[in-house]
Amino acid sequence: MDTQRVESLISSINSKKGMNLTDLSDFIDAVAKRSIENELIVKWLKAVHSNGISGEETTRLTRGMMESGAVLEWDDNTRVVDKHSTGGVGDKMSLILAPALAACGLKVPMLAGRGLGHTGGTIDKLESIPGFNCSLNPEEMKKQVMKLGCCIAAQNDAIAPADGLLYAIRDVTNTIDSIPLITASIISKKAAEGLGSLVLDVKCGSAAFMKTRDDAEELAISMVSAAKGLGINATAQITQMDYPIGRYIGNSLEVMGSIEVLQGRGSKDTRELVVLQGSALLQQSKITKNMQSGIEMMNHVLDNGTALQYFEEMCVLQGVDKDIAKELIQSPKSILPKSKYITDISAIGSGYVSEIDSMVLAGIARSHGAGRFALEDLIVPEIGFEIIVTRGQYLNQGDNWVRVHHNDALTDQQTSSLNSTLTLKSIREKGKSRLIKNIL
């Protein structure tokens, strides 16, 4: 694509006259083939970031990014589903949801990412399991999904390669926080899975990318619109992210928490989100007639051990030794990596547990290796936190409330931060649902 056509695209964005959609498709094709100068890509990204683009243009951008690489094809994609979360502290739902949905008869070709920021990603968590291989190509993904019903694989250059370059440039040009660019990046990869249905979990709150409800709704509506424009039956759930999800924060610890839920126990709020997302996908795929039937089916496969069996088989098919996989689902602590030190932190006051500052916990965990500062950083899987209280529980001064799993000593500053992270109140507050709003 020649420079003049790219400059024309940029000019049309800046003047808000609307892009030539054929030129836009050719631009994305050139990005995927790496046949365009990065300087022009930067100018285009900054124009989109500053001025925005229309819904129609966002959908065309998303389609071009999807078609820039491999797209999984199914004879019938009615029951091919996935979910995407915008991320949160303790967000481990994918590890539970994929095998649970497979146990309900759905096909889940899940592409997931590594974390860059305050927590690890789904792939980082799975790679804390000895032998787990997330490097599946599209053909291997499809083969496993046809055999078992689910896989969880790392995003790779075969899928939406245009997004790989655009995201890398966005990361260094301060153009990350653009609703159209976020939408196209997320939906293009999900659409490349050949989905029939998709649920989007858009986190909202102090520990989320979208801090306000208005911003979360804007992103949710944009993503649902783009997905529907590509023929995917999509819904979004806006959920609270002002309090850690579940009992565990950290990669191997969150695997342990996921297995506890798959064993039919575990954190109630983790299970609530898994059931919420799963029941929506069951209804969208017409396996169940309504949300309540989906909730019952999800609870059934979690309680009777079927979802756990699918998780075990997924581990084996993705490289884990059979004996290790069997021991993992029975006693995850005996298989997963362990930290050198475990330190309990006690409450400095008394009262009912009201808030725990998720970002403080995530920041400390990240500084000890649970998250990345740069893409090339290595994750230390055993680092993290175990929250040993529940919201609304009464604590006396001196009672332990969190357990730190660490290899290096905690600094005085970190200990001080942990002491101020917990908010206790004299009156017990009513329990809060994670779900804020559905976007259809």
Image (cartoon, helix red, strand yellow):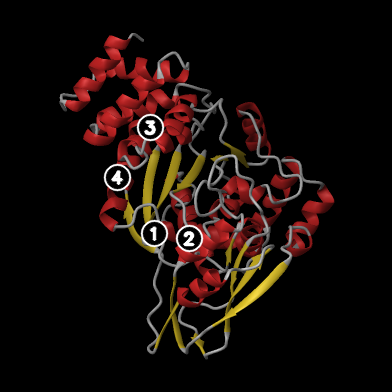
Locate residue 50: give its quadrant.
Answer: top left
- Between disc 1 and disc 3, the foreground one is 1
Q: Is residue 185 visible?
A: yes
Q: Position of residue 158 (x, y in %)?
A: 56, 25
Q: Secondary structure at mark 2?
A: helix
The label nearer to you, 1 versus 2, is 1
Q: Which residue is mark 1?
A: 239
Upstream in sequence: badge 1 or badge 2:
1
Name the residue type under label 3. Answer: Gly
Q: Which mark is residue 231?
A: 3
Q: Residue at x 54, y 28 (%)?
A: 74
Per the image, label 4 sits on a secondary structure element best described as helix
Residue 29's tag is none
Q: Earlier in the sequence, mark 1 or mark 4?
A: 4
Real-space Cα separation, disc 1 to disc 4, in angstroms: 14 Å
Which disc, if any, is residue 221? 4
Give whichever of 240, 374 is nearer the camera.
Answer: 374
